[in-house]
Image (cartoon, rainbow, N blue to C red):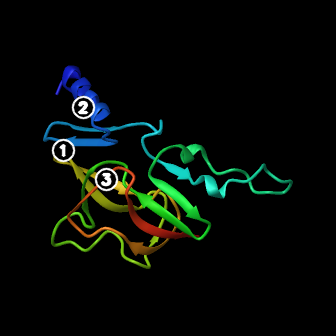
C-alpha cells in the first residue's frame, strides 16, 4: 500500500462518513481514524441546557460534546448512538458472547458493538461512563446514522 492508496482510502472514508478504517497484512498494518471534528462524540440535548454556570458549579463537560454518537435525553439516561449507517453486531463473531449486556458497566473506551459499513468492521466505543440499561437494536440488523443503540445510566 502506497501513499496514493492511503489517500484513496481517506477520500472514501470522508465521502461515506466512515470514522475508522483498519487493514492488517503480513508485512504491514494501517489504522485510520477520523478526528473529533463533528463526526462522532457526545451531543447534549437543548432541553438540558442551563442559563449559565453558577458559582461552585462543576465545570462544563468536555468538547467531545460536538459530534453525534451520544445524546443526553435526561440526567438519568444517555443514548449511545450509531456514528454511521451499517449493520449492527453485538459480538465480534457469531459464536462469541456479546461485548456488553444489560447491567454491564462501560467506560469511554469500552467497545460496545461493531457496525459493518462497506465490508469494514468498525468497533464502536461507549464514550461515556455508566451502566447499560437497555439494548435497543437486535443483532445483525441495519442501523442508521444517529440511531440509538443502547441506553446507559451515567455513573
Q: Is residue 75 above or below residue 108?
A: below
Rendered residue at 18%/44% (across/down): 118
What is the x, y in percent for residue 80? 44, 60
Gap between marks 2 and 3, in whole Å? 18 Å
Rendered residue at 45%/48% (across/down): 68
Look at the numbered disc 3 and give the secondary structure of its residue.
loop
Q: Is residue 12 above or below residue 122?
A: above
Residue 99 image-quadrant placement: bottom left
Rendered residue at 28%/29% (across/down): 10
Q: Is residue 131 above or below residue 84?
A: below
Task: Specify the quadrant that holds the C terminus.
Answer: bottom right
Residue 84 is labelled as none
Residue 54 image-quadrant placement: bottom right
What is the x, y in percent for residue 81? 41, 57
Rendered residue at 25%/67% (across/down): 91
Number of numbered discs present? Answer: 3
**Depth order, front residue of 106/133:** 133
Gap between marks 1 and 2, in whole Å? 10 Å
Whether residue 101 sits left or right of residue 76 in the image: it is left
Q: Within 10 Å of the Cα at label 3, are there few (<14), some (14-19), or many (20+) other Cα atoms? A: some
Q: Which residue is mark 3?
A: 144
What is the x, y in percent for residue 84? 32, 48
- Labels 1 and 2 touching (C-beta < 8 A): yes
Q: Which residue is mark 2?
A: 12
What is the x, y in percent for residue 13? 28, 35
Gap between marks 3 and 1, in whole Å? 14 Å
Look at the numbered disc 2 and give the secondary structure of its residue.
helix
Whether residue 105 sits left or right of residue 94 in the image: it is right
Q: Tell us which disc is closer to us: 3 or 1.
A: 3
Q: Which residue is mark 1?
A: 118
Amino acid at each position: 500500500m502506497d501513499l496514493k492508496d492511503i489517500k484513496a482510502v481517506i477520500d472514501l472514508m470522508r465521502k461515506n462518513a466512515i470514522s475508522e478504517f483498519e487493514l492488517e497484512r503480513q508485512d504491514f498494518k494501517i489504522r485510520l481514524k477520523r478526528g473529533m471534528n463533528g463526526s462522532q462524540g457526545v451531543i447534549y440535548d437543548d432541553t438540558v441546557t442551563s442559563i449559565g454556570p453558577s458559582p461552585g458549579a462543576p465545570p462544563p463537560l468536555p468538547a467531545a460534546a460536538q459530534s453525534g454518537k451520544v445524546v443526553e435525553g435526561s440526567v438519568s439516561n444517555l443514548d449511545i448512538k450509531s456514528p454511521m449507517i451499517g449493520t449492527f453486531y453485538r459480538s465480534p463473531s457469531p459464536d462469541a458472547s456479546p461485548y456488553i449486556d444489560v447491567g454491564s458497566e462501560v467506560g469511554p473506551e469500552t467497545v460496545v458493538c461493531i457496525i459493518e459499513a462497506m465490508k469494514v468492521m468498525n468497533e464502536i466505543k461507549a464514550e461515556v461512563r455508566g451502566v447499560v440499561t437497555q439494548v435497543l437494536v437486535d443483532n445483525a440488523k441495519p442501523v442508521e446514522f444517529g440511531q440509538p443503540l443502547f441506553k446507559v445510566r451515567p455513573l
